[in-house]
Image (cartoon, rainbow, N blue to C red):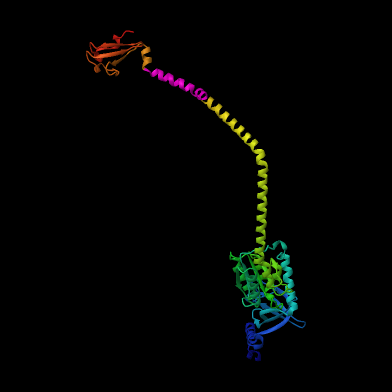
Amino acid sequence: MVLAERRIYQVSEINAYLRDLLEGDPLLSDLWVRGEISNYKYHSSGHIYFTLKDQNGCLRCVMFRSSARRLTFPPADGMRVLARGYFSFYERDGLCQFYIQELAPDGQGALYQAFCQLKERLEKEGLFAAEHKRRIPPLPRGVGVVTSPTGAAWRDIITVIKRRFPQMPVVLAPSAVQGEGAPDEICSALSLLNEREDIDLIIVGRGGGSLEELWAFNTEKVARAIFHSRLPVVSAVGHETDYTIADLVADLRAPTPSAAAEMVVPCRSELDERLRQLMNRLLRATQQKLQAEKEFIYLYSARNLKGLLGRTLSLQKQEINAYSLRLLQMPQLILDRYSGEIKALSGKLDALSPFHVLKRGYSICLDARSGKLIQDSNAVKKGDQVTVVLRRGSIDCTVNEVKGESQWSSSNMRI
């Protein structure tokens, strides 16, 4: 009876209560926790799951993809970190979890450990290999620079370039060089410069600083952006003793931004002097060559001119004789070639000739005055004068009678 008066709760009700209790506590809504990472798991969704522990306890931790993508180092088991986030209760599984929004290595030792881990991994992939290093052009058309427009590095680079080569075009792609958004800005600036056609190389750099301040140049995304750059990249990060992942991936490492400008841009006055020396050497060499050729021509021309002319005339005489012989032989060759055709045509012409008809015993009657051939008896009348041409000679006749075609037939003819 007493039990019936008590309220019975559902599991989900208790879990919801615990969630509200944890999320309503001001202390647990935004705090930093120091610990060591263990059971680290990266999910295909981009979320990160691990346990944060110390010598006396542990916390289940979750870092969602939106926060994990801002990481500047790769977390790993055994790494000591500082984590900022809030506590909540995962109702489905009944778990209290620390939802991490920001994660940073705990001290320089952890940063250096993260640096070593990334360096080792990228080196195994070949990103530092010498065969991937590209040659820096000796005289670039223009120089691109990725750095902060307000930093000393930009002032040093532009000062040195303008001193050494005042006409050299310099294109600044402004970018943050430290802080949470710096890696993305550096990558974007590299991408923009790679799209230009008026520059031949890129300087990426900044002034010196602590390991934390230089950390943007130790991130994997910046390293891969430099490696995949279409243009050669010169890394000039920090002071001479500072080394970053960007230095190892770049095609050339400069100890300082000023040194980078010295290395990639030649001195204009030195180039002018070198060009003047080369022009003088070319002029002297040309003059010496011309003098040698003149002496050679003078030495051999008088000696060989007579013989050369004689050989030339002899060859031309032989050619003339050969052409003359061919001209003399040409008529006979033509005659021999066409003699058969000429004979055939002569036979045809002879067969068609009226004189060939006279040889067979026939005669030709012509008008005595006009000399025209008479083919019709109606063309003459009694008393007209005609000439009869025979095989041998001709006869002048007077027409006594004209007979029509009906009055004459082949039977009147006797051969």
Disc tally is 0
Residue 346 lies in the magenta-colored region: yes
Question: Percent from the top left, x then y, of residue 398?
Answer: 25, 11
Query: Looking at the figure, which quarter contains the C terminus?
Result: top left
Q: Quadrant of residue 116?
A: bottom right
Question: Percent from the top left, x then y, of residue 299?
Answer: 68, 43
Residue 49 lies in the magenta-colored region: no
Residue with the most extreme left position: 382
Question: Percent from the top left, x then y, of residue 215?
Answer: 69, 75
Let me know if residue 69 appears in the view.
Answer: no
Q: Quadrant of residue 325?
A: top right
Q: Quadrant of residue 118?
A: bottom right
Residue with the most extreme right position: 55
Residue at image position (36%, 17%) is: 354
Question: Percent from the top left, x then y, of residue 375?
Answer: 29, 17
Nearer to us in this view, 287 or 206: 287
In the image, is residue 245 above or below residue 351? below
Nearer to us in this view, 220 or 147: 147
Q: Which residues are magenta?
A: 331-353
Nearer to us in this view, 248 or 36: 248
Let me know if residue 292 appears in the view.
Answer: yes
- Magenta stretch, main secondary structure, is helix
Query: Looking at the figure, which quarter contains the N terminus?
Result: bottom right
Residue at image position (61%, 64%) is: 141
In the image, is residue 155 above or below residue 374? below
In the image, is residue 31 above or below residue 214? below
